[in-house]
Amino acid sequence: MFEVTKKRYYFEVVDNTEYKRGEKVLVDTARGKEIGVVYGEARTLPDTELVLPLKPVLKKASVEEIQRYNNLREEAEAAYLVCKHKIIRHELPMKLVGSEFTFDKSKLIFYFTAEGRIDFRELVKDLAIVFKLRIELRQIGVRDEARILGSIGICGKELCCRTFINKFDSVSIKMARDQGLVINPSKISGACGRLLCCIKYEHSQYSEALKGYPAVHQAVDTTSGPGKVMSVNPLNGYLYVDVYNKGILKMTLDELKFSVKEAKKLQNKLSAEEKKLKTLEKE
């Protein structure tokens, strides 16, 4: 794992050295030698789970290398403030998120978010004059921003993207609705302003269970008379139906009849309010 971006990659252990979680190691990357932090113990994995060829773990980082790494992080923090001042000076509509030097100090990378494309050529020229090395400005999404900055989720724990999620999965409004969640931005959005990643975790179970159920607001015939489905709880095997002239009753599938074809159509259809929240699905 690389500490600034919190991204995790597989590297090949090419010797008999035992690497423990939390230790700093020197690894070979596409941009040269870098310091990373061991995220998990070495294990054998099938090729299907890997992006080959793997880069090697070179060795455990020495005291001197760790000190150099820490010094570079301090310098990167100072560079962050300089860049932030330059952004304000150039009046650019971008938000600076983080900064880091490559381990050989040949390049300084700044991470930022913005609504669209930014012409930062003049900013790069200014930064190159100040730092006298290669400058790279890398635009990232709001989910990556949350991963870098870190926060506490609505569950009270550290963000999933900060601790174990490496690749972001697509999450949709329909997934939230299928699980009976309140379709309210404040209830289903994470620190990044996008849909909660955890909505994805149990969706396959709900999706499978819903196949035999009518859709919410669908008209059905029940043993107590015609009615309309108000809510569905497929994992517990019941639903609530507003039966005409009798009120809302708790029922099971055995007590009603409905059109399966219509159920599928309604389950896949988003309401006008749900369509307005489609922006929460953006990466």
Image: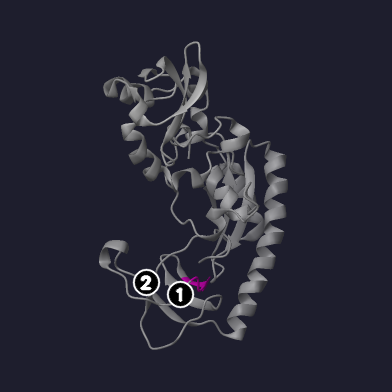
**Residue positioned 50% across, 15% down in the render:** 246
Residue 255 appears in view: yes
* Residue 237 occupies quadrant: top left
**Residue positioned 39% across, 72% down in the render:** 11
Q: Measure the alpha-carbon separation of dots 2 and 1.
A: 7 Å
Q: To which residue does mark 2 refer? A: 55
Q: Which residues are magenta?
A: 33-39
**Residue positioned 54% across, 81% down in the render:** 61
SS for dot 2: loop
Colouring mode (rainbow / by chain / secondary structure / one colour) = one colour
Residue 268 appears in view: no
226 or 215: which is nearer to us?
226
**Residue positioned 48% across, 43% down in the render:** 199
Rendered location of residue 92, percent (x, y) = 64, 37
Indicate whether 219 appears above or below 159. Answer: above
166 or 107: which is nearer to us?
166
Q: Residues within 10 Å of mark 1 (few under 14, many from 20)?
A: many
Q: Residues within 10 Å of mark 2 (few under 14, many from 20)?
A: some
Instruction: Specify whether 195 is left or right of 130.
Output: left
Rendered location of residue 271, percent (x, y) = 46, 20
44 or 211: which is nearer to us?
211
Q: Amino acid at mark 1?
A: Val
SS for dot 1: strand
- Image mark for residue 27: 1
Residue projecting furthest to the bottom: 16
Q: Amino acid at mark 2?
A: Lys
Labels 2 and 1 touching (C-beta < 8 A): yes
First of labels 2, 1 by sequence position:
1
